[in-house]
Amino acid sequence: MECDVVLATGVTHQYRAGGRNVDALRGLTLSVPRGSWTMLVGRSGAGKSTLLGLLSGQIEWYGTGEISLEGKSLRVLDGSSRARMLFQVRQDPLTSTAPDLTVAEHLVLADSCPESRQKSWIHRARDTCFPLRSAHTGSFSSLLREHGLAEYLDAPVAELSGGERQLLVLLLAHLRRVPFLILDEPLSNVDDVHARRCLEVLHRLNQAGTTILMVTHDLHVACAHGDRLACVGAGRTLAEFAGAAKNELAPSRLWELMETAEINISSARGAVDA
Ligand SMILES: Nc1ncnc2c1ncn2[C@@H]1O[C@H](COP(=O)(O)OP(=O)(O)OP(=O)(O)O)[C@@H](O)[C@H]1O
Ligand SMILES: [Mg+2]
């Protein structure tokens, strides 16, 4: 049987802050099957970014439980193996683009060097693939036109707005045939028009076979897109939805789930303090 892209069971993680331990994950469980688009929702502080940070290797993991990526334990995967397996889209798209290069140059590099999946891929690709750029530039005009970026073909990326840059980052991920995309609130700084365009590119990526794990606070977006959803609270999984249960899921149900979890957590804390 094919393994899940991510399988997390009973995961704990603590931060050390100001001389005390902060429990960020307290037994979180999650599965992200290959080819799925899994939404991850939960109140602030629930542990969503921590989980993504553990997956990408941005946060070192010393906790208990098990997390596997493509069937291999995170504990044995080095940075370059992870970089080949996944690509992280952050709130700030500046981190995965080079402001001095034009949009066309980014597209050529992404298309020519799909195997460069490191965080700094654009800088590495620039050194190895640059001679290819002028040959391909014209072929990307229609792609940009389709996504409302046509006028920026020869503009340095520094001249794009945050929303336009986020859209470009997703188009680059598409061209690079990224197998697994993790996104932490990718639409939080993006207007409605660009958010819709970004979601269209994500649908395309997913249809082309990319597995997606996306954190969002927009419960309408979480319910309307993707085929799975995990709701987390205080470092634990409150519920996972797939298939018909995901299709029928309404924002109000998620809101209720989070609200009830919060009430339970506060009363448990109250009982401990009493
Ligand atoms: N670097 C850190 N040092 C100490 N505690 C941290 C650190 N990063 C996160 N935490 C704590 O870990 C818990 C989970 O944080 P995390 O950032 O994963 O939440 P989140 O679900 O992504 O929240 P948000 O929706 O606000 O982004 C919180 O209690 C947070 O205060
Ligand atoms: Mg977060």
Image (cartoon, grey):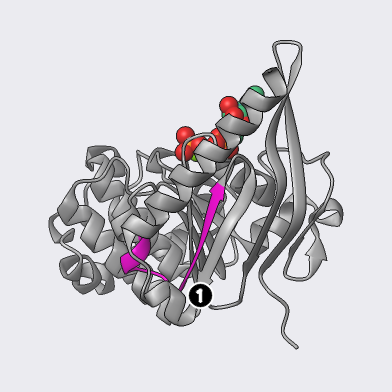
Q: Quick check: is the Cβ at mark 1 less than 8 Å away from ligand 1?
A: no
Q: Amino acid at mark 1?
A: Ala
Q: Identify the residue at image location x=82%, y=41%.
A: 63
Q: What residue did someone put label 1 on?
A: 242
Which residues lie in the magenta part?
Answer: 222-232
In this orientation, does residue 177 appear?
no
Q: Nearer the viewer, residue 85 or 172?
A: 85
Give percent across and percent down for residue 129: 51, 60
Taking the view exactly as shown, the residue that stands out farthest to the top is: 18
As for residue 127 lying within the magenta part, the answer is no
When the figure is inspected, residue 112 is found, relative to residue 20, above or below; the finding is below
In the image, residue 183 above or below residue 38? above
Q: Residue at x 27, y 41 (%)?
A: 162
Q: Left or right: 111 with respect to 88?
A: left
Horizontal relation, residue 253 to residue 103: left or right: right
User: With respect to residue 128, does 138 lie above or below?
Assistant: below
Where is residue 11 drawn, in percent x and y?
75, 49
**Total tally of numbered discs in the picture:** 1
Using residue 154 as the reference point, say whether residue 44 is left or right of it. right
Is residue 225 inside the magenta stretch?
A: yes
Question: Residue at the location (21% across, 57% down)?
Answer: 153
